[in-house]
Each structure stands twice: as C-alpha cells, then as structure tokens.
Image (cartoon, grey):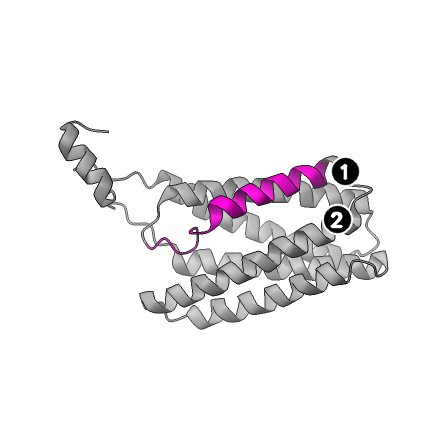
Amino acid sequence: MKMRSVAPMKIAKIGYIVMSVLFCAAGILFMAEPGISTEIIGVCIGIAMILFGIVKLIGYFSKDLFRLAFQFDLEFGILMIILGVIVLFNPKNLMVFICIALGISILLDGLFKIRIAMDSRQFGIKSWWLILSLAIVTGVIGVFLIFESVIGSQILAVLLGLTLLSEGILNLYTVISTVLIVKNQAPDSFEVEAFEIDGKER
C-alpha cells in the first residue's frame, strides 16, 4: 500500500504557524503605531488574507490525521482570498469595509474554532478548553471590530491590532495542538479501494 505524502501537511502546518506569527506581529505593530496610514494597513491586511486563504486551502486538501484544524478551510480559505483581493486593490478608501470584512472573517473563524475545540475534546486532546477559550475571546473581539468601525482611525488601528493578535494566537495554538503529522499515514479507505481495484500505484 502506498503511504500518503506528508509534504502538503508540513507545508500547511508551517504556513499556518508563519501566518499566525505574522498576524501577531502586525497586531502588535498596529497597536504600537496607531497613526499608521490606512493605505499601508489595507495593503498589509489584503496580502495577509490572500496568503492565509491559500494556506487554508493547502491545509484542507492535505488530509492530516485528525482532520480538526483544517476541516472548515475550503470555504473559509476561498472567502479570505476573495476578501483579500478586494481589500488589496482598494486599500485607501475601504477602511470601514476592511474592518467589517476582517471582523466577519475572524468572527467566523472563532465560531469554527469552537467546533474544533469540541471535536478536540472527543479526540482526547487535553487542551481543548484553551482552544475554546481563545476562540470565544477572538470571536468577541471580531464582533467589536465589526460594530466599532465608525470610531476614530487611531483607536480603530489599536482595535484592529488587537484583533489580529488574538487571531494569530488562536490559529497558532490550534495548529500546534491539533495537527499531527504521521510519516507513514495510510490513505483513506476509498483511496485504498481504488488502489486495489486498479492494481497499480497512484
């Protein structure tokens, strides 16, 4: 039986970690420098959303062992790429849209991570409660970002930074605690059946 390649899983896991760290760094930067221009913020967030959307798609198709962290990433990855493109090509005049789009994305991600936390509990992952707590906090902050988009630009930058920081921490901890890469992972049952019927490697 041909074992599944772990390369996509490694790419997805490393990509998740890198993007999560970048989200945290951007969040700290926005909070430390609230006077940063909205155009720079828009460009940075647009690029980050596109890259993270691509990473999420890779994660979804990597078929990791537990299927927890990436289970909702097909639809969510596509959504992030679309929103990222819109933000990237209109970074200066779409600050309100940026906040609403990012707030909705992070709120949805928080809700999905709550489901992942519940599934992690069934898998016996002891730190499921921490994923749940981080998901709730991140979702609440996402709601604040959506409805506080009319406040002053500097305060908004700080809130935006806090949102990115919480999202980065949530994704970083989720992928580290729930994505297990096994070198000799067997294909799914339907893949094994197809292999046996054809009688040749795929």
Q: Is residue 183 visible?
A: yes
| Residue highlighted by disc 2 | 97
Image side of residue 173 versus residue 125, left or right: right
Q: Tell me if residue 147 comes above or below residue 198 in the rendering.
A: below
In the image, what residue type sits under mark 2? Phe
Which residue occupies 56% across, 48% down? 19
Q: In the picture, which quadrant includes the C terminus?
A: top left
Q: Which residues are magenta?
A: 66-88
Image side of residue 134 versus residue 159, left or right: left
Which residue occupies 42% across, 51% down? 71
Are discs 1 and 2 less than 8 Å apart at CB?
yes
* Label 1 vs 2, first from the N-terminus: 1
Across and down, in percent, residue 22 comes to: 61, 50
At label 1, counting other C-alpha atoms closer than 10 Å, the crowd grade (few under 14, some 14-19, many 20 or more) is some
Which label sits on residue 123? Answer: none
Which label sits on residue 90? Answer: 1
> Residue 84 in magenta?
yes
Decide whether the magenta segment is chiefly helix, strand or loop.
helix
Q: Is residue 47 visible?
A: no
At label 2, counting other C-alpha atoms closer than 10 Å, the crowd grade (few under 14, some 14-19, many 20 or more) is some
